[in-house]
C-alpha cells in the first residue's frame, strides 16, 4: 500500500479555472508547473492528477505531463473525488493541492507530510495563516492540505453538508475535538503579508502572477524568498525600510 499520494485537483473546475490552468509560464502550462513542483517533493510516494470523466476533463488530460498518471472520476464533490482516488491507488493518505496554484513550494508540502506522520493516524493537517485557516474558504494558492484515507472515506459516506463535501478541510476543523488535526504556523514572512493572492480569477490577478514569477527568477518556488520579497514590497509601500 502507498503511504502518501500527492493529488493535483483538476476535477470539478469551472470553465474559468480550466482556462487558467492552460495559461503559459515560460513555455509550460500552469498545470504542468503545479505537477512538476509536486513531483519534486521528497515525501510523496507518487503524484496523480485527478479530473472529471467526459469532456470536462479533456483539457486536464491533454495538459498533464505524460509521465504522471491521470485519474478520471464521476464524483460531484471534492471529498468523493479524493476518496475514489485514494482507493484506486491504495494510499493511506494524501496531500491535496489545486491545479491552478502556480506558486507551490515543495518544501511546504514535505514539511506538512512530515508533521502529519509524527502523529499517529493524523486525520487532517494544514497551515495556519494569520490566526486563521486557509482551507476554510479564504484566499489560498500556496498551502496544501493533508488527509488520511480512512477519515476522508468516513466524511464522504456520512456527511451530506455540501460545504463540507466541497471543502473537506472545514469539516475536520469544525470537528477538531473528534479528530486528530495538526495545524502548522506559516513561516518565512508569508504570515505577515495581507491581501496576497497566489491563484487568479481575472486578468489583473494574472498580471500580478507574471510580475511575481519574473521577480522570483526561480524554476521552483522558494517560500522563504517569496516571503522576503513580499515583506520588502510591503515595507516600501508603508515607508518602512528594514535592514
Image (cartoon, grey):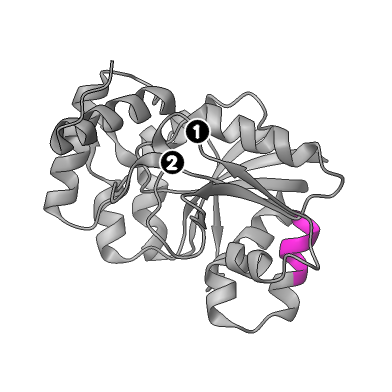
Which numbered tag is attached to residue 187? Answer: 1
Q: Marks 2 and 1: CB-CB under 8 Å?
A: yes
Q: Quadrant of residue 13?
A: bottom left
Which residue appears farthest toward the top when viewing the image? Answer: 243
Vertical order, 184 against 17 (above or below): above
Q: Which residues are magenta?
A: 149-154
Q: Is residue 102 magenta?
A: no
| Identity of the residue drawn at 57% across and 42% down | 48
Vertical order, 174 against 187 (above or below): below
Q: Is residue 26 visible?
A: no
| Identity of the residue drawn at 43% across and 41% down | 191
In the rendered view, does 42 fall on the left or right side of 136? right
Which numbered tag is attached to residue 191? Answer: 2
In the rendered view, does 213 fall on the left or right side of 48? left
Residue 231 at what x, y percent from top left?
29, 31
Q: Quadrant of residue 208?
A: top left
Residue 230 at what x, y percent from top left?
28, 32
Magenta: main secondary structure equals helix
Vertical order, 64 against 182 (above or below): above
Quarter of the figure that contains the C terminus = top left
Q: Is residue 153 magenta?
A: yes
Residue 47 at what x, y percent from top left?
59, 37
- Name the element at disc 2: helix
Q: 79 and 18: which one is in front?
A: 79
Quarter of the figure that contains the N terminus = top right
- Name the element at disc 1: loop
Q: 132 and 30: which one is in front?
A: 132
Which residue appears farthest toward the right when viewing the image? Answer: 120
Amino acid at each position: 500500500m502507498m503511504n502518501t499520494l500527492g493529488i493535483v485537483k483538476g476535477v470539478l473546475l469551472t470553465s474559468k479555472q480550466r482556462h487558467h490552468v492552460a495559461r503559459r509560464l515560460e513555455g509550460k502550462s500552469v498545470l504542468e508547473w503545479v505537477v512538476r513542483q509536486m513531483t519534486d517533493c521528497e515525501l510523496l510516494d507518487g503524484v496523480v492528477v485527478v479530473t472529471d470523466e467526459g469532456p470536462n476533463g479533456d483539457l486536464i488530460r491533454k495538459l498533464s505531463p505524460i509521465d504522471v498518471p491521470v485519474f478520471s472520476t464521476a464524483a460531484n464533490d471534492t471529498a468523493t473525488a479524493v476518496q475514489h482516488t485514494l482507493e484506486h491507488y491504495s494510499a493511506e493518505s494524501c496531500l491535496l493541492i489545486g491545479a491552478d496554484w502556480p506558486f507551490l513550494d515543495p518544501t511546504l508540502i514535505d514539511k506538512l507530510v512530515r508533521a502529519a506522520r509524527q502523529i499517529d493516524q493524523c486525520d487532517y493537517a494544514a497551515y495556519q495563516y494569520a490566526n486563521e485557516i486557509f482551507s476554510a474558504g479564504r484566499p489560498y494558492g500556496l498551502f496544501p492540505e493533508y488527509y488520511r484515507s480512512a477519515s476522508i472515506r468516513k466524511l464522504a459516506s456520512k456527511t451530506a453538508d455540501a460545504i463540507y463535501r466541497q471543502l473537506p478541510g472545514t469539516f475536520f476543523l469544525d470537528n477538531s475535538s473528534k479528530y486528530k488535526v495538526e495545524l502548522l504556523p506559516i513561516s518565512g514572512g508569508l504570515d505577515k503579508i495581507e491581501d496576497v493572492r497566489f491563484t487568479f480569477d481575472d486578468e489583473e490577478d494574472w498580471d500580478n502572477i507574471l510580475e511575481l514569477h519574473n521577480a522570483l527568477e526561480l524554476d521552483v518556488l522558494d517560500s522563504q524568498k517569496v516571503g522576503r520579497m513580499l515583506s520588502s514590497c510591503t515595507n516600501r509601500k508603508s515607508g518602512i525600510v528594514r535592514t
